[in-house]
Image (cartoon, helix red, strand yellow):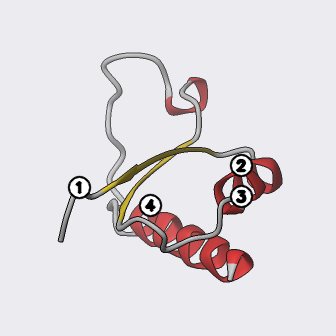
Amino acid sequence: MSSKFIRIALSLALTGMALGGTEPVAAAGPSAADEPNLLNIYNWSDYIADDTIQNFEKETGIKVNYDNYDSN
């Protein structure tokens, strides 16, 4: 289950980057290379294993900001 989540999260992150457009954008602040890799996930509770995020961060070097919905 956890490796499946990692593949899905990476696919979503890469799709989001691919859909970002092809035109260069002037940065107002630090360059993108200076910013940390961060993946924001907002999910229902108990949908992933306890060690999934820790394993994902260790394998990819991408920090995960994980939050759960309060209710349905």
Task: Point out which mark residue 57 bears.
Answer: 2
* Residue at 44% in and 61% down: 17
Which residue position is annotated with label 3?
Answer: 56
Q: Looking at the image, tell me whether mark 4 or mark 3 is earlier in sequence order.
A: 4
* Residue at 61% in and 76% down: 5
Q: Amino acid at mark 3?
A: Phe
Quarter of the C terminus within the rendering? bottom left
How far apart are the two marked residues, 1 and 3, measured between alpha carbons? Answer: 24 Å
Which residue position is annotated with label 1?
Answer: 70
Give left or right: position of 23 versus 8: left
How far apart are the two marked residues, 2 and 3, measured between alpha carbons? Answer: 4 Å
How far apart are the two marked residues, 1 and 2, measured between alpha carbons? Answer: 24 Å
Task: Point out which mark residue 17 bears.
Answer: 4
Which quadrant of the structure image shows residue 45? bottom left
Residue 32, compared with residue 18, is above or below; it is: above
Residue 10, compared with residue 55, is above or below; it is: below
Kindly state the secondary structure of the residue where label 3 is placed: helix
Between 48 and 56, the residue placed more toward the observer is 48
Are circles 1 and 3 on residues that touch, CB within 8 Å? Answer: no
Give left or right: position of 39 versus 5: left
Residue 7, compared with residue 40, is above or below; it is: below
